[in-house]
Amino acid sequence: MSATNTSLLTTPLNALHIELGARMVPFAGYSMPVQYPAGLMAEHVHTRTAAGLFDVSHMGQLKLIGADAAAAFETLMPVDVIDLPVGKQRYGLLLTDEGTIIDDLMFFNQGVVDGEPTLFVIVNGACKVGDIAHIQTRIGQRCKVVPMPDHALLALQGPQAVTALARLAPGVEKLVFMTGAAFNIAGCDCFVTRSGYTGEDGFEISVPAAQAETLARALLAQPEVKPIGLGARNSLRLEAGLCLYGNDIDTTTTPPEAALNWAIQKVRRAGGARAGGFPGADKVLAQIDTPASLQRKRVGLVALERVPVREHTELQSTDGRKIGEVTSGLLGPTVNEPVAMGYVEAAHAAIGTRVNAIVRGKPVPMEVRAMPFVPANYYRG
């Protein structure tokens, strides 16, 4: 990755983005494409109906290597690492000692690689330096922590993603959601998982940086595929009810407050065979076991007037008392109504509860709704 005169880093696909007419913006320390000439709305719709290609090379990739890697990594998170089968991926949460969220991530059990058990981990771009340092400090004496700065990451998302990718990589269609394998795609050495951040079926593809442009051009040559920027990535993930680290979760939020209990398997909960043993366990497990102890909760919200409600907008009860704040919000292109997520006092978190968002000094009525706003389209076989 190279640095520009503005000290922003660039991904291996930077020249291709510019060639394709992308509008570039700073994001997570990188110059990244926010949209291409077609515009955010068209890119969003294309991903929902065909296949969109995203450059997510700003994300952090690393490997944890050694016989003790899984057990060591499990000490950092409230999720089951040890029992993750070879060939499968899981969502995880790095926690502080207070039980709040350092980052959310994906990890994959690659099995034995070059004679040693190996986990492949993807963390958020803005957090990757801190995450890798945290992991190295906490478990570096138990396994090898190997960053992969020489790799790019591409995401191919949408209902026709499998059609496009299988044309180049026969056999990839046999993968199901949250599984993966190595493939040669257009002469590039790729590691592919069937996963993503849009709520749609799709794939994330790790590739050596030197081969990234070759891979991207091969994918864009498929009739189903168009390039998609960060703007549509954001609107897609919000409609899918997926958190953005730094907006919807951070070191002030615990997993139960963030409505992420689903990510914590029974084996790590009270009464489980490997309960606790992670940072902040007492607090997190108490919140899971006693939901009434939660003072606030992350909820989905829909505005009842056609007024987009953006992040940091104050939320009030119908009698005018502040009860929370919006953390992400926009006009959802697929649902065609203003959607948001945010935190409210627990007493106002039930589905159907009415609240007011204060937009330019005026109350906009909103209703707490279930997420996702758009049903997930993952392929589970």
Image (cartoon, helix red, strand yellow):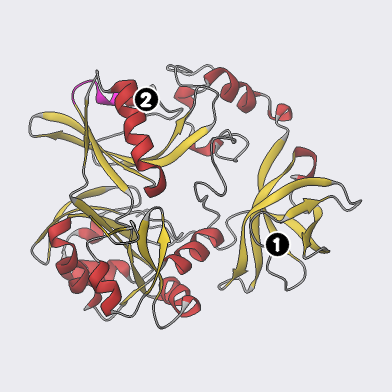
In the rendered image, the vertical position of residue 150 relative to residue 157, given as above or below: above
Quick one: 50 or 366, which is closer to the camera? 366
Span shown in magenta: 66-72
The residue under label 1 is: 302
Q: Secondary structure at mark 1?
A: strand
Q: Position of residue 356 (x, y in %)?
A: 81, 57
Q: CA distance from mark 1 to mark 2?
A: 37 Å
Quick check: 172 above or below 305? above
Front in this rendered view, residue 91 or 379? 91
Residue type, mark 1 in image: Val
Q: Position of residue 230 (x, y in %)?
A: 43, 65
Residue 292 sits in quarter: top right
The quadrant in which the N terminus is found is bottom left
Q: Residue at left 21%, top 59%?
A: 172
Q: Three-letter amino acid code at disc 2? A: Glu
Up/down of 50 relative to 293, above or below: below
